[in-house]
């Protein structure tokens, strides 16, 4: 597109872009291929495990079931080391991210270890800038419309609505009515029975924790059960997107 393009030509150029890229252009965001991977997959596995040693087996089980976005929370002991290992072993198959990030230094450490996206329970500008400044996706947490709009206006790639347990999908419909351009992801209380409801309410993806990776299955090292859960989540999400 030339610098002297008229309004009609500019409009044609913009509307010819894929939806995610158009949204990024309108919001001043940088195109990042991992954003499309997160959106296409639709399910972010939120892992809070008792040991980082369990991460490879859980990740392998999730990937086998079709869940290809894996968030390692900083509440997992030795999380940074675990992110590094997952990134080396599964980085070509899944998008590895870090969660429960509360400060910029932790954000930078996780990115250096291989995290491609950064999730936090609330919006912190220093964390957000550390993620975006290193070319990674920023998924800050928010709850109220004011918090959601603040995070989005700052350049968040997706706003994590947390905790979403007591809010329900209807809350997304209410928020997205005046803010249809905002990308929202519920975290908390998402299960295989309601994942479709969240998608139909406007969620671009969902964050799923213990309902996807039950503590009992991890304790028993029942990786097949986790794979079966992953498949069920993926099937429910795909059915809701049809």
Image (cartoon, rainbow, N blue to C red):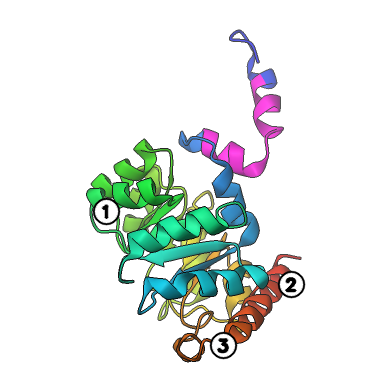
| Circle 3/circle 1 CB separation < 8 Å | no
Q: Percent from the top left, x then y, of residue 112?
A: 36, 46
| Circle 2/circle 3 CB separation < 8 Å | no
Q: CA distance from mark 1 to mark 2?
A: 37 Å
Mark in front: 3 vs 1: 3
* Magenta-drawn stretch contains 88: no
The stretch of residues the image draws in magenta is 10-25
* SS for dot 1: helix
* Magenta-drawn stretch contains 20: yes
* Mark 2 vs 3, N-terminal side: 3
Mark in front: 2 vs 3: 3
> In screen coordinates, is 20 left or right of 112?
right
Q: Percent from the top left, x then y, of residue 168?
A: 48, 77
Q: Does residue 100 sit above or below 24 in this rendering?
A: below
Q: Does residue 139 appear in this view?
A: yes
Q: Main secondary structure of the magenta part?
A: helix
Count neighbours of disc 1 (C-alpha within 10 A) and say few if under 14, some if 14 to 19, many if 20 or more. some
Residue matched to label 1: 106
Q: CA distance from mark 2 to mark 3?
A: 26 Å
* SS for dot 2: helix
Residue matched to label 3: 222
Q: Does residue 178 appear in this view?
A: no
Figure quadrant of the C terminus: bottom right
> In screen coordinates, is 100 left or right of 103?
right
């Amino acid at each position: 597109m030339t610098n002297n393009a008229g309004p009609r030509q500019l409009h044609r150029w913009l509307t010819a872009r894929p939806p995610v890229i158009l949204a990024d252009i309108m919001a001043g965001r940088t195109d990042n291929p991992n954003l499309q991977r997160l959106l296409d997959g639709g399910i972010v596995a939120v892992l809070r495990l008792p040991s980082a040693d369990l991460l490879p087996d859980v990740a392998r089980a999730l990937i086998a079931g079709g869940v290809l976005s894996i968030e390692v929370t900083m509440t997992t002991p030795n999380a940074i080391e675990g992110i590094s290992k997952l990134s080396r072993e599964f980085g070509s198959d899944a998008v590895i991210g870090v969660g429960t990030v509360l400060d910029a230094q932790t954000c930078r450490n996780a990115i250096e270890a291989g995290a491609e996206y950064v999730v936090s329970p609330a919006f912190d500008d220093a964390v957000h800038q550390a993620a975006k400044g290193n070319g990674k996706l920023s998924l800050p947490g928010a709850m109220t419309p004011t918090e959601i709009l603040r995070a989005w206006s700052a350049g968040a790639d997706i706003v994590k609505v947390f905790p979403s347990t007591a809010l329900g999908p209807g809350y997304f419909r209410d928020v997205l009515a005046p803010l249809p351009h905002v990308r929202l992801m519920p975290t908390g209380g998402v299960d295989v029975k309601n994942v479709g409801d969240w998608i139909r309410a406007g969620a671009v993806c969902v964050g799923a924790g213990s309902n996807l990776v039950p503590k009992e299955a991890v304790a028993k090292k029942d990786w097949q059960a986790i794979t079966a859960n992953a498949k069920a989540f993926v099937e429910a999400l795909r059915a809701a997107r049809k």
